[in-house]
Amino acid sequence: SICLQEEEPASHSYTQSDRTYYLPSQVEESRLISIPQTMAAPTGSLMSLLKQGARHYQGEEEAVIRNITACKEMAAITRTSLGPQGMNKMVIDSHEKLIVTNDAVTMLKELEIQHPAAMMLVMAAGRQEQEVGDGTNLVITLSGELLKQAETLLRLGLHPSDVVQGYRKATTEVLKWLEELAEGTKCTDIRDRAQVARYIHSAVASKQLSYATVLSALLADACVSVCPKEAALFNVDHVRTVKVPGGGVTDSLVIHGLALVTPVRGHVRQATNAKVAVLPLGVDLAKTEAKGVVTMDKAEQLLSFSKDEEQLLENRVKQLADMGVKVVVSGEAVSEMALHFLDKYELMVLKLHSKFDMRRVCTATGAQPVVTHNLPTPSDLGHVDSVGMEEIGSTNVCVFRQENADNDRIVTVLVRAATSNLLEDIDRCIDDAVNVYKGMTRDARFVPGAGATETELSVRLRTLAESTPGLEQYAINKFAEALEVVPRTLAENAGLNATTVVTQMIAAHSKGDIHASIHLESGEVKSASEMGVFDLYGTKYWAVKLAADAAITVLGIDQIIMSKPAGGPKIRQPGARDA
């Protein structure tokens, strides 16, 4: 170690900043100031600064390529499920529940991805779900392909910063061109059921191609029915879904009101032009929190005590009946005594276990929940045209109908199917279509679908790359090649020759036909507008933006530092050795 001493200058010494430094051989040993070894600057790797058990990866091969490989593997899972002809995935979760779906969000949620770089793509898909509610598979597929193309450039010697700079310039231009492509197609009237069904058909067909026409008409009717006068205030929660097993998908129907799969208590099962009281605390009398002891000497006292309680409860039910209430919705259990008086005064009673269902009843009827044990006021009561039990298949469904309302507060799409997996998949399909309609209320512009938009953007980017100087042109060219993954994947999933189809589409777009797209049944290149295949502009905009941002973020990582996991050793799971 170097020894320091601050003294008068002597021979064989040098001075700097009013301090004199001596070599160890020039001073007495007793006057040396030795620097401790722990204070010396570390000369080893980063691991000397971290706790034992931490891991560190750096460099292009260990960090960048490792992250790209993980993202490519995850994108390969969802890519085969893209488009109407996409394949389903069979996922068995930790509770041994079987899930068969081609929905990317469901797959990623059930797979429980752990890799940190792959989680960035998952978060990008989650953001797409929050912003638009559709197009999550496109985000994962496009970001994975962007990283795959970037890996080719990195292995050729380009620095990640050059690739990131080119990708950013390409993203900016693509978003500008998207707005140009959306100018020609727009839903002129979002309250026209025929137009709405035409434009949401693509979103439905991407999940349920066989039943796209039937479901599109049902969902158009449902969405238009609950669309408020201020269309931007459309709420997706006002379109409910009830799954009833049995029958076929063509047996599905739209109920203008609320349907609940729950039985009715008591013998009153129907009511028309009824006032509705919502009592979250139940119909029974309030009970004290403290325990009390009542001493009785005679049997008459016990009978009198019970009669007083019965009289109070009967008066409470009678007051509800005198207010014109015909339907009581209770959030607590209904006692046998309360049920007796409710039947006596011909009141229909419904017990709901979920507070969310209770809120939906309030939305459908206009009632206000009474959160105290007091009786409701006239302003707290709701109204329903008819309510009653209906047997659909072998399932009892309680239906609140509002037939005479000018604008429905809530509608229910009653879905029928043979299997539970198909019911769940149709439910996800309905969610995507309703979110597309919500996007239409904010921006009703559309772009050509079936791979036409991505091919047009790819052709324009290649032209831009030819006129771009420097190393950015290679990244822009690879971005254009990555966009071709959409028409290529659609053709592959449909069993077509992807190379031939993509080549024909590029040739058509190079001649100026921006609507040239794939006809998945014949494999020919046809106009998307003639086939009626459109994608919402907002869906495509956010998908490209989020996919590019996720890819750029992953490419900007040059080190991976992982701390030692907290806690003790993991418990060994039962396996073959325990059999």
Image (cartoon, rainbow, N blue to C red):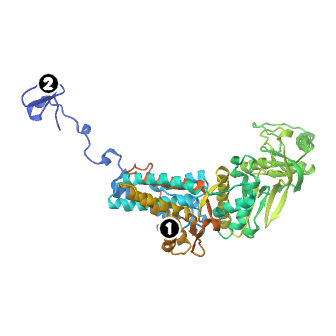
Q: Position of residue 187 (x, y in %)?
A: 68, 56
Q: Which residue is mark 2?
A: 7
Q: Position of residue 145 (x, y in %)?
A: 46, 62
Q: Dividing the picture into quarters, in which one does residue 217 lie? A: bottom right
- Among all residues in the image, which is located at the extreme left? 11
In the drawing, does residue 464 fall left or right of residue 191? left
Secondary structure under badge 1?
Answer: helix
Query: Depth check: 209 or 401 in front?
Result: 209
Image vertical order of residue 42 relative to residue 143, above or below: above
Q: How many marks?
A: 2
- Earlier residue among tags 2 and 1: 2
Residue 9's tag is none
Q: Dividing the picture into quarters, in which one does residue 368 lie? A: top right
The answer for how far apart the CA atoms under marks 2 and 1 are is: 81 Å
For the point 61% across and 53% down, which residue is it? 132
Q: Residue flagged by tag 1: what amino acid is it?
A: Ile
